[in-house]
Image (cartoon, rainbow, N blue to C red):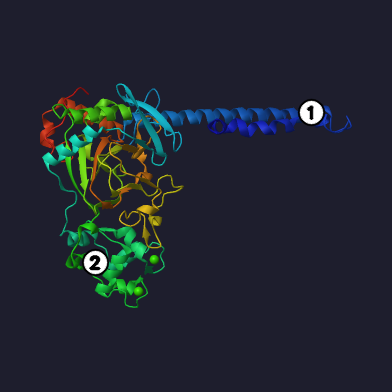
Amino acid sequence: MPGKQGSPGAEDAAPTLPSVRPPCDRLPCNKSSVCSRSYFVVVMVFFHIYIINVIALLLYVHYNSGQDEASSRGRDAAGSGHQRPASGSESPKPDVSLTRIEGIRVGHVHKVSLVPGRVHEMRTLSLKPLLFEIPEFLSEHECRVVIQLAQLKGLMESQLMVQDGQEELAKELNLSPDEIFNLLDINQDGQLQLHEILTHSRVRDGIWLTPENLREVYDGLKADKDNNGLLSLEEFRLLSSDAFQRFLMQRGVKRSQLVRNSRHTWLYQGKGAHQVLQDIKERVTRLTRLPPTLVDLSEPLQVVRYEEGGHYHAHQDSGPVYPETACTHTRLAANASTPFETSCRYITVLFYLNSVEGGGETAFPVADNRTYDEVSLIHNDVDLLDTRRNCNKSNLRVKPTKGTAVFWYNYLSDGRGWVGEQDEYALHGGCVVTRGTKWIANKWINIDPDYQRQVRYQQLVSQNPEDEEDEGLMLDPDVEGSDIHQDL
Ligand SMILES: [Ca+2]
Ligand SMILES: [Ca+2]
């Protein structure tokens, strides 16, 4: 295809050429009339003018495309901040090209060498997101040590309730009830359907709303006057901006109604850490085939425990990256005026530290779906992000088996060896644990999609190793240090 589009001038010109053959070739004609010498001269003059025009057109096209290339190279070289380096000899090119393992097809098995003397099998589970499973990635001993180290350190609640802040949000919003209504009314039919409210307000300060408890709120507040299950503009106007929130708080919130219901801690994996933790980090480097520096500079190992009834509704591990967004891990190197911050986790490696007796699968609701559409995630009262009730409707579920690792890419490739856009299909969650306890660990590999920012960050860290503790490079304050002193 690109070859065909490459020379539009030549393509347009070529088919018209045969038509200028002298008409004598085709028509038996009288020499004295149409095929006279003067007629032939006229035809030849037009033919020459035509050829000159075609040559001029080709020159014009060639000259212009050359100019475009030159100007785009100029823009890249100038580095306007948001642009990533383009390929080509004159533009700043990443020194490293990130390896991205090919999925080939679902069910494909790669043999990988991760530890001396044995071969692991890595099976492709989906292509969107690019997701793999490696049984027996961790030994029984390693699983036990990680759990014990986490217990020794102590786990904290993964989600704390935020009681205040709703009032402030309403003030900040500075929108009239009519304006809010109009924004929520996705299909613009003048009524608010349940899914329209849930799409925008599924999470209210960490409380997960389901269609059922939204109906409860309607009943409690007597919001749906005509009882048709919809909110009209008149009904909506009668509600105060924080009515929902106040109602939910008064009624009391159970752990099961939170976005996530688990406890976790962080384990440092650098120099001086327990050998098992260092071994796991090295194995992750071999598995992902990424530069060791990137793995070394990433977040520590997160260990999570879900009790019976624990869950984590479907979410993305990474945020989308826009020009005005900075990555949490490279914020040292970011422009100070960047207003938003997000986790930039190129890869998630998730380890199952035990085999769960009941439930607790990792669900990927839209894996290998044909399309991704945020609004259709709630359909006919079925919320695909709700891992307490709808895990069985997820496209893919991975059963927790002790020692197994799964890993996936949260970003696509930019096609030039670096990190591209967020992969929306990487949406995933932890299904409710129906029996027993579930222990997992997460290793995230942090890479900034902005190549220059990642490089600046690594330079800063290598130049000022002492600053790192003060500035809190790590995402979690209880992390005692890191191994960023290693060679970059
Ligand atoms: Ca509507
Ligand atoms: Ca109504």
- Label ID, residue 249: none
- Taking the image as four quarters, which one is ligand 1 found in? bottom left
In front here: 330 or 9? 330
Q: Is residue 44 left or right of residue 103?
A: right
Answer yes or no: is residue 111 visible: yes
Question: Where the C terminus falls, by quadrant?
Answer: top left
Which quadrant of the view contains residue 194? bottom left
Q: Residues within 10 Å of mark 1 (few under 14, many from 20)?
A: some
Kind of residue indicated by mark 1: Phe
> Residue 170's spot in the image, x, y percent?
22, 62
> Residue 106's spot in the image, x, y percent?
44, 38
On the image, numbered disc 2 is attached to which residue?
Answer: 244
Answer yes or no: is residue 334 visible: no
Question: Where the N terminus falls, by quadrant?
Answer: top right
Kind of residue indicated by mark 2: Phe
Above or below: residue 253 compared with residue 20: below
On the image, numbered disc 1 is attached to which residue?
Answer: 40
Q: Residue at x 30, y 62 (%)?
A: 210
> Residue 86's spot in the image, x, y percent?
38, 30
